[in-house]
Amino acid sequence: MLDINYGHGSTTGRLMSQAVQRFGPRTALIAGERSWSFDAFEAIVSKLADGLAGRLSLGSRVALMMGNRADYLFLQAAIERAGLVRVPVNGLATAHDVALIDADCAPGAIFHDRAAAARIPTRDGLWRICVEGDTAHGGPSYAELLATEAAAHCEGPRLDDLASINYTSGSSGRPKGVMLTHRNWAAVYRNMLIDRDIRADDTIAHIGPLTHASGAYFTPWFLRGAANLLIEGGSVEALLAAIERHRVTVFTCVPTVLTRIVNHPRVAAFDLSSLRLIGYGAEPIPRNTLVRALDLFGPILEQNYGLTEAMMTCATLPPRDHFDAGGRPRLGAIGRPYSFVEIVLRDQAGSPVPVGEIGEITVRSDHVTVGYWGMPEATERVLRDGWLWSGDLARLGEDGIISLAGRSKDMLISGGFNIYPQEIEATLTGCADVIEAAVIGLPDPAWGEIAVGFVALAAGSPRRADDILAEIKPRLGIRTPKRLVILDHLPKNANGKVDKRALRAANLEAEES
């Protein structure tokens, strides 16, 4: 095995090795019909780390583009140990998106599955290594790396070395590569282990893409000695069956997936009694989804708030805080800051806003990004005097609970009034039969901008746009959307979030035609 010197401080690689020594024969990972103990996981990661460190120089970028499979997690850990920089790419990303990322950070290698092969750039100097079969172009095959013999001493990463470049989703033009160091990632996992209820006897199911939040959740549960279960293909049916079969205790997902779960026609047919915790985050949860999930599963929901620039762990709302003093479910709440995180809501001048008023979330913590790859001006705009300006708007309650109001760039001004789409969406998803809702601002000659709503209804619902608008107008008044469009379903991006850009583009195209 390669003798890696991890430098000063405990990087994730060193902490994972300690976990292996402690939990060796226990099950660490399950995928399909296969499982790996902590010892077996370590053996594979060590070979891959040896093979990569012997062929690529310290700090080289290595991209990963594949669906949820064990190989992704082996490579994630191996890249970390070899002192290379991981670049996760969503397995559903288009060839155009992949080309932009490749042009931006110029990875030396990209590991992929067969499904992604046709979307990989063919640039000279880029190793294209398929983890299925023995296909490789320009570099060693995956099988060769797995067969690596013990190699020479490797310097290994230090805490302030770059560990990953995570590209922000949903942006137009040049993508932003968020740089996270080994220190940043160590802080993410520390935050989770301190403030989240992570247990050694858990079996946690991953339904979301490992290239995003699920990949971040893997490590803290690994460090605690739990079993990680991959739901290949991201199917809700497969998740429900796996919960019953493997007695899953925890799963995490985005609210759109939770919406599909609580509305699944056969959800009551599965034994889900083993569940003790369901984590959700990354976008606002519809009111009806929250209420149905609490009715179906009980008070076991946990909200997590973070962003790519402050990965995963800014604020959390544990199960006990999902209800206000009157016992009603809180909507839009993201909770309180993690123990080692500071959050201040500020106005545009940078001054803290009073309790109850809307301000932009600013964050200071060891897990905040060091900046954007190759974009110093963009970095200066979001990192000011040691604080990250998130772009998210929120209110602080008297009880210390933070509630989101929306994105600063999504706020629209209609007839001189500030309108926050998220507040309208929360009202819409409280209406009977409304499963999902999205609100966008569109230009209007009379109002400057108008709010346009889009909803997806339960199958067979007789509801019409005009009666839904009539229901919400007494509550929203001037904020009531000027138009409401009923769709079979709302479009989603590759991360499973509602794609407002697609809604905006389709609406503008319809107006022009």
Image (cartoon, rainbow, N blue to C red):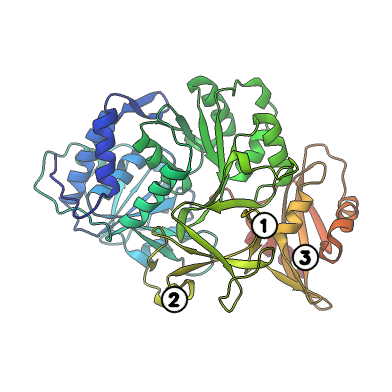
Residue 240: name its quadrant. top right
- Give the crowd class for mark 1: few <14, some 14-19, many >=20 residues within 10 Å: few
Q: Is residue 149 left or right of residue 422?
A: left
Element type where label 1 sits in the image: loop
Element type where label 3 sits in the image: strand
- Give the crowd class for mark 2: few <14, some 14-19, many >=20 residues within 10 Å: few
Of the two numbered discs 2 and 3 on the same chain, state the one appearing first in sequence.
2
Q: What residue is drawn where x is 24% and y is 48%?
A: 81
Q: Is residue 210 left or right of residue 157?
A: right
Q: CA distance from mark 2 to mark 1?
A: 32 Å
Q: CA distance from mark 3 to mark 1?
A: 30 Å
Quarter occupied by the N terminus: top left
- Amino acid type indicated by mark 2: Glu
| Residue holding disc 1 | 398
Q: Is residue 145 left or right of residue 178?
A: left
- Amino acid type indicated by mark 3: Ala
Residue 380 - label: 2
* Percent position of residue 111, x then y: 33, 48
Residue 61: name its quadrant. bottom left
- Amino acid type indicated by mark 1: Glu
* Percent position of residue 227, x then y: 40, 29
- The answer to whether 279 is drawn above or below residue 474 in the figure is above
Q: Residue furthest left?
A: 152
Q: What residue is drawn where x is 39% and y is 59%?
A: 366
Quarter occupied by the C terminus: bottom right
| Residue holding disc 3 | 451
